[in-house]
Amino acid sequence: MNPARRFLTFACLSFFAVLPGLAVAETPPLPSPVPVDGAIELPGAARETPHFQSFRADYKVTRSVLDSDFTLASADLRLELGSEGGYRYSSNLRPAKLIALFYGDELAEYSRGHLEDEGVRPDLYEMRLSGRKAREGSIVFDREAGVVVQRFKGREVRQGVPPEAHDRLSLQLEMARDLAAGRRAMQYLMVDRNRLRVYRFEVKGEERIETPLGSYETLRVELAGRLRLEDAAGLDVDTVHTETDLSGEDQTTFWFAPMLGHLPVRIRHEDEDLGTFTMSIERLEMPLALRAQAQGVTVGAASP
């Protein structure tokens, strides 16, 4: 596995190893798309649910070795919202020119589903990897039957799961929702490439992070535990015990900016074998009012 893809596999765990641009499989359009300056709020009390807003965020992926940083790839995330609670969250990873000469892989993924009172509920996840080792895969969530059907590497796997099961992208939206509600310890069941895993995340502190977009107060969130399962039918995700002693293992840290709807502005993965990988936000398109509020400026007619 090339370094850029290995970073995304580890650091994104469930939600951020993905990035849009490359056309994935065709999907029906969302009903009544919300324009870029629109917003949609999850039902329920305002203190319990954040405002999800359409956006596109661009990132740079770097690798640090011997005090030197090398650009491995560019990545972007895009959230599109529908008027009836539908969402389409997509992502694309493009290797840097030098990396592309040797690997030439582009990774494109998307998640489609609904924002409900109980949380984010994905219906379909699809991915496509182009290049020398091209492959495609999908996950279909059948909540009435309490199962998911995964199709990767020519295999079809059917597994029992509870309603709160997530794919790698929908999990990011659920975490933003939970952080906005004030949760500081969270567990999620992630369905990914013929596997089921429970991940535990904990808020470890607050930090101000400097970015090309400005300076932001962030919540520093770390991976605190994980558990692999063969089947999760009837599982209580919040109470299941995960391995919490991750000392000596690879470390993954996320920095979420509350002023940007708890969007990650930085992700760092420290790998004993490959060094340190960092994914940093470079550019953001989101509703002008929220962007201006985050930057502490007066809303005007012009956008950055």
Image (spheres, rainbow, N blue to C red):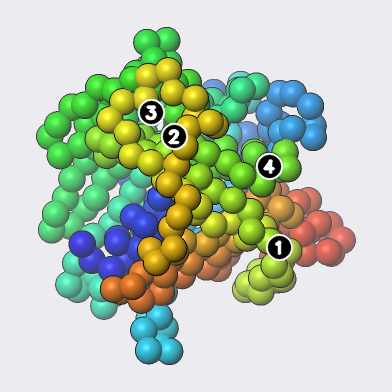
User: At label 3, which amino acid type do we have?
Assistant: Leu
Secondary structure, mark 3, is strand
Question: Identity of the amino acid at label 2?
Answer: Leu
| Discs 4/3, front | 4
Rendered residue at 39%/15% (across/down): 146
The residue shown at (18%, 57%) is 131
Q: Earlier in the sequence, mark 4 or mark 3?
A: 3
Report the label total. 4
| Quarter residue 52 falls in | top right
**Which residue is under mark 2?**
189
Residue 141 is at least partly visible in this image: no
Task: Name the element at disc 4.
Answer: loop
Alpha carbon distance from label 2 to label 4: 17 Å
State which tag comes first along the sequence, 1 or 2. Answer: 2
Task: Give how far apart the Cα atoms at labels 2 and 3 are.
Answer: 16 Å
Q: Residue furthest bottom?
A: 67
- Label 1, label 3: how many angstroms apart (C-alpha)? 34 Å
Near mark 1 (Cα within 10 A), the count class, few <14, some 14-19 or many ≥20, is: some
Residue ranking furthest to the top: 144
The Cα–Cα distance between marks 1 and 2, rounded to whole angstroms, is 26 Å
Q: CA distance from mark 4 to mark 3?
A: 27 Å
Q: Which residue is mark 3?
A: 124
Considering only vertical position in the picture, is 220 above or below 127?
below
Q: What is the CA distance from the residue labelled 4 to the residue labelled 1?
A: 14 Å
Residue 50: image location, x then y, percent: 71, 38
Q: Which residue matches tag 4? A: 183
Q: Are marks 1 and 2 in contact (CB under 8 Å)?
A: no
- In the shown orientation, is residue 58 left or right of residue 152? right
Q: Name the residue beneath numbered marker 1.
A: 206
Give the image location of residue 292, x and y in percent.
78, 58
